[in-house]
Each structure stands twice: as C-alpha cells, then as structure tokens.
Amino acid sequence: MIRLSNKRKAPVYNFFNILLWMLLAGGCIGFIVDKIRFNILDEKSCFLIIVPIVLLIVIYIHGKQIFEYDSEGEAVHFRNRSITSFLNKPQSDEFPKYKLVKFEMFSFLFFRRLYVTILSKNSGTTTLTYEISYLTRKQVSDLKTSLNKIIRANKEKRHQE
C-alpha cells in the first residue's frame, strides 16, 4: 500500500497565492492613482483590478491544493486542505479498508475530483468528494492503482464469505 502527498509543493502554491494578492493590491492602488492623478488608461484601468480578481477566483474554484492519501495499515486516510485555510475548511476522513466500495475520478479541463463511495451504517453508502486537481499524472495513476487493489481485495473477501 502507499502514501501519497503533494504537501511539499505548498510553498509554491503559497507563493503564487501571495503574488496574486499583491497584484490585486497593486492593481487597486494603480486604479486609484490613475483615476485621481493621471487618467492615462481611461476605461482600461478597471482591468488592473478585474484580472487579479478573476485569477484568484479561478484558483479558488480549482480546489484545495494539498491532498494526502495513506493506505498503509487497516485503514484508508484521505486529507484535503487549502493553503488559505480561511477560504476552505480542511477535510479529513479515515475509515477501514473493508468499507471502500468504489471510486470514480472526474476530469474536466484543469479540474479533477475523486469520488469515493463507502459503506455506511445509516444510509447504506456515502460518497466522499476530494479535489485532486493539483496532483501529477503519476500521483493520480498511483492513487488509482492503490484504490483498485483495495476494492479488488474487498470483492474477493465478500465473494469468499
């Protein structure tokens, strides 16, 4: 079984996040200075604010940057968090391997989501969602392989019983 994490890239994500916030602050100052003093950009000065806001929205929609997966031992542990904790609350789920029923990965352009279905006492099954847009192709492939092994082992156990 494997451990998978992209938290080593957190400083890079944090750098770009801070850079965009600084670009937005600089754009606001530039917009105000242009309107009050120079008036060089005319109507185009609003792009000094719009472009950084659009980029920040895209990053927010893109999802949580840090994904951790651990399938060593008898339990499976998923952890998904954003580098800006005030925007998204961290998600952490741990459950026994035998509860894992199936998983599905959804990809659209630059967005990727992992849907994991587990057995639940109350409703039969529960689907958990994780944002995996920031994982590399190799990490996604390793994740698929590990989850498939667990599901295959669970099916064999159920078939033997």
Image (tube, rainbow, N blue to C red):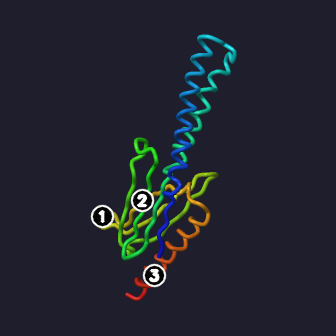
Which-is-in-front pick, marks 2 and 3? 2
View extreme (left): residue? 122
Residue named by callout 2: 79
Dot 3 crowding, Cα within 10 Å, few <14, some 14–19, many 20+: some
Q: Is residue 27 above or below residue 151?
A: above
Q: Amino acid at mark 2?
A: Arg
Secondary structure beneath label 2: strand
- Residue 109 location (% of width, % of height): 64, 52
Where residue 22 sits, quadrant-wise, is top right
Secondary structure, mark 3, is helix
Question: Given contact means CB atoms under 8 Å apart, are the residues at marks 2 and 3 in contact?
Answer: no
Q: Earlier in the sequence, mark 2 or mark 3?
A: 2
Label 2: how many Cα within 10 Å (few below 14, some 14–19, many 20+)? some
The image quadrant where one finds the C terminus is: bottom left
* First reached walking from the N terminus: tag 2 or tag 1: 2
The numbered mark, 1 or 3, whose residue comes first in the sequence reads 1
Question: Residue placed at 46% from the left, 61% from the top?
Answer: 68
Where is mark 1, residue-wise?
A: 122
- Location of residue 15 with respect to 122 vertically, above or below: above
What amino acid does circle 3 point to?
Ala
